[in-house]
Amino acid sequence: MTARIIDGKAFSAKVRAEVATGVAALKASHGITPGLAVVLVGEDPASQVYVRNKGKQTVEAGMASFEHKRDTSITEDELLALIDELNADPAVHGILCQLPLPTHIDEARVINAITPEKDVDGFHISNVGRIATGQDAMVPCTPLGCLMMLRDHHGSLSGMNAVVVGRSNIVGKPMAQLLLRDSCTVTIAHSRTTNLAEVCREADILVAAVGRPEMIPGDWVKPGATVIDVGINRLDNPPGSEKPTRLVGDVHFESAAAVAGAITPVPGGVGPMTIACLLANTLVSCCRANGADAPSGLTA
Ligand code: GUN
């Protein structure tokens, strides 16, 4: 069997087009432009690339983009004051504080200072609780993107056996909650799980979010399963290769694609969905703040 490739690049373009249509409709009906504020502390190169891409795609969707770059010398109080300013700014409907933050700043304190309605990352403790209890919430972007692709591929996920490998607050835990809400039977596995291979082999839906390059080989995949690879890892190529490095996921793509029913590639799978869902969350936040209906396909 050769798996169907789930094309996150094409899917994210569709989501972004839907967001752009929603933004244009909101401008026409309410005269409001959704605005996304991104806070970046320090010079981490990967974070700088993310933030640049976010800003570009925000503007392309017709939204306002506000970037707040600060030096690593910023104090926690100064950062909290900036968050307060953005909370109070009516032109800002979404606030994202790029992680990781420098170690002298308490990340949880900063995240929980964001008004939950503007927390387009879905990391605020109130949004975490609302997701866990089945209430309307801001849903973390990467798990939301995975869920959209799974629903698009399967229709209903009800009754499926889902295994999420990874227990991070950003991906693993919220992913498990969303799958549970869609009536999957959910297992959260991680690096300490005994018999991880056997646990993975039970999965109709296998979500890999551990951050270890090519850790999951094809013989851990149940024949016909859907594999969602959240990992983005950069590996060195052998000397003399055309490019010095390459991106790989947490799943060994070739061997898994030979067994799975469907699989997301790296790059071009989950990655592009994350920013598309950030734009979707910003639009949804703006709609809710102004009593307008949010496009139904863009929420969890
Ligand atoms: N750093 C890496 N991924 C993310 C994300 O999704 N949101 C934020 N705020 N920071 C990140």
Image (cartoon, rainbow, N blue to C red):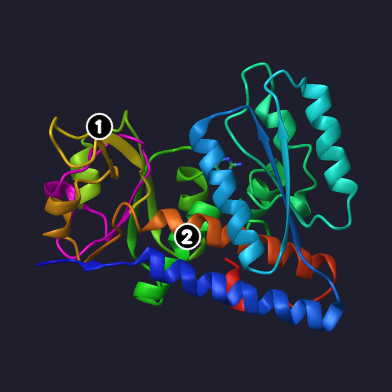
Q: Is residue 1 left or right of residue 216?
A: left
Image x and y of residue 207, in percent: 34, 51
Q: Residues within 10 Å of mark 2 (few under 14, many from 20)?
A: many
| Residue picked out by circle 1 | 194
Does mark 1's beta carbon lie closer than 8 Å to ligand 1?
no
Residue depicted at x 56% and y 75%:
17
Q: Is residue 135 visible?
A: no
| Residue picked out by circle 2 | 273
Image x and y of residue 13, in percent: 48, 70
Q: CA distance from mark 2 to mark 1?
A: 31 Å
Ligand 1: image quarter: top right
Q: Is residue 52 left or right of residue 205?
A: right
**Three-letter residue code for mark 2:** Met
Q: Is residue 255 left or right of residue 158?
A: left
Instruction: Quarter of the image for the C terminus: give it.
Output: bottom right
Q: Which residues are magenta?
A: 202-228
Q: Residues within 10 Å of mark 1 (few under 14, many from 20)?
A: few
Mark 2 or mark 1: which comes first in sequence? 1
Point out which mark residue 14 bears: none
Secondary structure predominantly adopted by residues drawn in magenta: loop
**Three-letter residue code for mark 1:** Thr
Image x and y of residue 84, in percent: 86, 39
